[in-house]
């Protein structure tokens, strides 16, 4: 699996401390990131592919400094947002997937073959010529995933990929994720989604508060949240 290294990487945006300097090495295949709203999870995830910049320290992806080589890193690290609507750019589902490949300058035949394979893989073949906006929430999420995976990245980062989905679609996305060969980093409030991951990191107030196997990290998170909720009710 790719190695991602945070070396005292912090984020101070508009004079506000968002992330304390963090040192972390990520080598596992499936990594979950959990924690309270506003804790810094999305900020942390965005540092990995250069969507956001560390204002101190460095983040390395396979030895590449993300701040200096963002373009190269983004070829290897795909990012999926929770609101799949934001990732729709073209008038049809097939064109939307093909759009991802525009920079690859593939022969037309190969590009079409890749798009076709992605449509089949994600059960979107029947919607190839439909407007992406007509898809259901779950199908839009699958389209966003297809558009990222067609680029064959080594790492996929997904920020709350299941938030807007019903149980069926959540389970569907979970199964598709479990079948991916890629390294997978998932930011989520859906604790069931990551209970079989290799590692779970809990972020709070811009710090890594907990880090380890999913069982105990999730358990401590739930216990802390219950305790603080009890306190606030008193
Ligand atoms: N570019 C920015 N400039 C200023 N503040 C920012 C910026 N980006 C994020 N923040 C702030 O940093 C804090 C952490 O945000 P972040 O989105 O990383 O949290 P999160 O853990 O993903 O929360 P949620 O679970 O609600 O998605 C928030 O208070 C947010 O307002
Ligand atoms: Mg977030």
Image: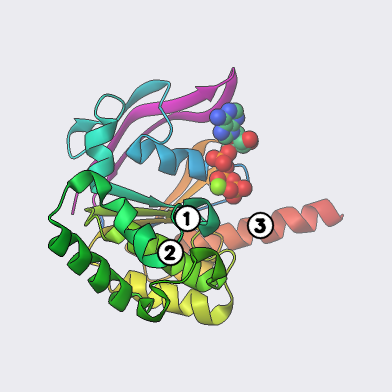
> Residue at 28% across / 47% down in the picture?
77
Up-down: is 234 above or below 139?
above
The answer to whether one can see residue 199 in this image is no
Is 81 within the magenta? no
Magenta highlight range? 1-27
- Categorize mark 3 by other alpha carbons within 10 Å: few (<14), some (14-19), many (20+): few
Give me the C-alpha separation between circle 1 and circle 3: 36 Å
The answer to which of 38 and 83 lies nearer the viewer is 83
User: What residue occupies the far right of the structure in this picture?
Assistant: 234
Q: Which residue is mark 2?
A: 92
The reply, left or right, for residue 17 in relation to residue 78 is right
Measure the C-alpha gap from mark 2 to mark 3. 43 Å
Query: On the rendered structure, is 204 left or right of 201?
Result: right
As displayed, is residue 4 above or below residue 145? above
Residue 46: which quarter of the image? top left
Q: Are marks 1 and 3 in contact (CB under 8 Å)?
A: no
Residue 104 rendering spot, x and y as whole percentages = 19, 47
Which residue is identified by label 3?
A: 225
Q: Which residue is mark 1?
A: 88
Q: Nearer the viewer, residue 75 or 38?
A: 75
Q: Quadrant of residue 148?
A: bottom left
Q: Nearer the viewer, mark 2 or mark 3?
A: 2
Q: Position of residue 131 (x, y in %)?
A: 49, 66
């Amino acid at each position: 699996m790719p190695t991602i290294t945070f070396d005292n990487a912090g984020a101070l945006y508009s004079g506000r401390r968002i992330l304390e300097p963090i040192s972390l090495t990520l080598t596992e295949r499936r990594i979950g990131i959990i924690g309270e709203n506003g804790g810094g999870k999305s900020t942390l995830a965005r540092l990995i592919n250069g969507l956001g910049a560390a204002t101190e320290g460095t983040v390395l992806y396979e030895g590449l400094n993300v701040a200096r080589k963002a373009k190269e890193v983004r070829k290897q690290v795909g990012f999926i947002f929770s609101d799949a609507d934001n990732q729709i750019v073209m008038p049809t589902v097939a064109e939307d997937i093909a759009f991802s490949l525009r920079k690859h300058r593939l022969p037309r035949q190969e590009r079409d073959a890749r798009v076709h394979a992605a449509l089949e893989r994600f059960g979107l073949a029947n919607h190839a010529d439909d407007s992406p906006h007509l898809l259901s929430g779950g199908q839009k999420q699958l389209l966003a995933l297809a558009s990222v995976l067609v680029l064959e990245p080594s790492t996929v980062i997904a920020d709350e990929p299941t938030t807007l989905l019903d149980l069926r679609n959540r389970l569907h996305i979970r199964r598709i994720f479990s079948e991916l060969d890629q390294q997978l980093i998932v930011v989520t409030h859906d604790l069931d989604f990551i209970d079989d991951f290799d590692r779970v990191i809990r972020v709070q107030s811009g710090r890594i508060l907990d880090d380890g196997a999913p069982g105990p990290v999730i358990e401590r998170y739930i216990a802390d949240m219950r305790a603080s909720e009890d306190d606030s009710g008193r």
